[in-house]
Image (spheres, rainbow, N blue to C red):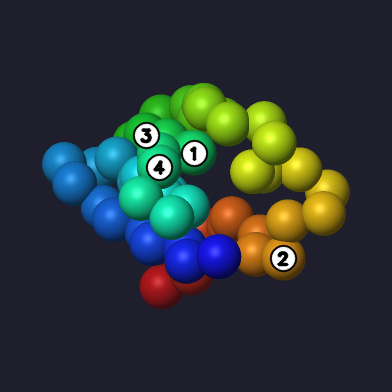
Amino acid sequence: MVFKEKTVDNELYVYLNGKLIYKKCLHTGQSKVLDLMAYDKYTLKSIKEIEK
């Protein structure tokens, strides 16, 4: 499994093997999980905000 995180215009995108699975707006904190099978309790990578 290859995870890729990308930030564009204050939106965080997370891809799994080239497929978009998670999207989050960094200003408002709203998020959307686009693929429930890829993002469940058995996923090896957790999605969390980077603290500065």
What separation in Å lies between label 1 and label 2 (alpha carbons)?
14 Å
Kind of residue at badge 3: Cys
Judging by the rendered image, the residue that carries numbered circle 4 is: 19
Q: Which residue is mark 2?
A: 44
Distance, label 4 to label 1, CA atoms, is: 6 Å
Dot 4: what SS? strand
Query: What residue sits 42% from the left and 49% below the top?
Result: 14
For the C terminus, give its image quadrant: bottom left
- The crowd level at tag 3 (other Cα within 10 Å; few <14, some 14-19, many 20+) is some
> From mark 2 to mark 4, how far is it between C-alphas?
17 Å
Compare marks 2 and 4 and give the one earlier in the sequence.
4
- The reply to whether callout 4 and callout 1 are in contact (CB within 8 Å) is yes
* Pointer 3 or 2: first along the chain: 3
Q: Residue under label 3, please give it.
A: 25
Residue type beneath disc 4: Lys
| Residue farthest along the bottom direction in this orientation | 52
Q: Position of residue 37 (x, y in %)?
A: 69, 36
Provide the residue designation for mark 1: 21
- Answer whether labels 1 and 3 touch (C-beta < 8 Å): no
Horizontally, is 22 left or right of 27 in the view?
right
Sequence-earlier tag: 3 or 4 = 4
| Residue at image coords 82%, 54% | 42
The amino acid beneath tag 2 is Leu
Mark 4 is surrounded, within 10 Å at the Cα level, by few (under 14), some (14 to 19) or many (20 or more) other residues, namely few
Label 1 CA crowd tier, 10 Å (few <14, some 14–19, many 20+): some
